[in-house]
Amino acid sequence: MSKTKKRFIAGAVCPACSEPDKLMMWNEEGVPHRECVACGFSDTLNEQGLSVPKELGTRVNQAQPAAAKPSVQTVQFFPNPKLKKPAE
Ligand SMILES: [Zn+2]
């Protein structure tokens, strides 16, 4: 808890108030958090590095950027068993 090191991100612009050099960043359990000291905006970044505002619940209420689909796609091809002749 107390090990959290917050540091300012040089050159970063707050997505909420557009103030430069007001964003602090730190990690919690490997998750990057950001917070603006100017306006109080805070968010986290997901695995894709996309901003995840904290007030966002599970609800999808915003047009999310078309996130690239995970490269691991479950593509399963089932041969039609009916086409298979029973092996005798
Ligand atoms: Zn701000």
Image (cartoon, helix red, strand yellow):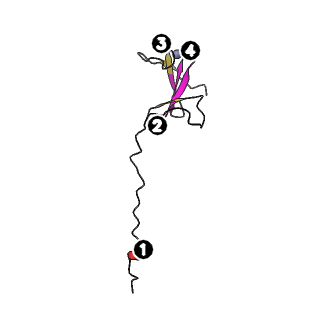
Give the number of the disc on residue 39. 4
For the residue with label 3, is its CB less than 8 Å from the closest atom of ligand 1?
yes
Task: Find residue 43 and report its image quarter.
Answer: top right
Q: Nearer the viewer, mark 1 or mark 2?
A: 1
Residue at x 46% of width, y 13% of height: 21
Residue in the picture at 38% in, 76% down: 83
> Which residue carries the number 1 mark?
81
Q: Amino acid at mark 3?
A: Glu
Instruction: Write the start and end of the magenta stretch as one range.
Output: 25-49
Q: Which mark is residue 47?
A: 2
Instruction: Please state the horizontal and vertical placement of residue 75, each as a whole percent of the image.
Output: 40, 56
Q: Vertical placement of 22 versus 56: above or below?
A: above
**Mark 4 vs ligand 1: CB below 8 Å:** yes
* Callouts 3 and 4 close, C-beta under 8 Å: yes
| Disc with the residue nearer the chain's start (1 vs 3) | 3
Q: Which mark is residue 6?
A: none
Asked which quadrant contains residue 80, the reply is: bottom left
- Kindly report the distance in space between the C-alpha atoms of the residues bearing marks 4 and 2: 25 Å
Q: Nearer the viewer, mark 1 or mark 3?
A: 1
Using the numbered discs, state the Cα–Cα distance from disc 1 to disc 2 in whole angstroms.
Answer: 39 Å
Q: Secondary structure at mark 2?
A: loop
Please tell me which of labels 3 and 2 falls first in the chain.
3
Q: Please tell me which residue lies in front, 62 or 49.
A: 62
Residue 19 bears which disc, if any?
3
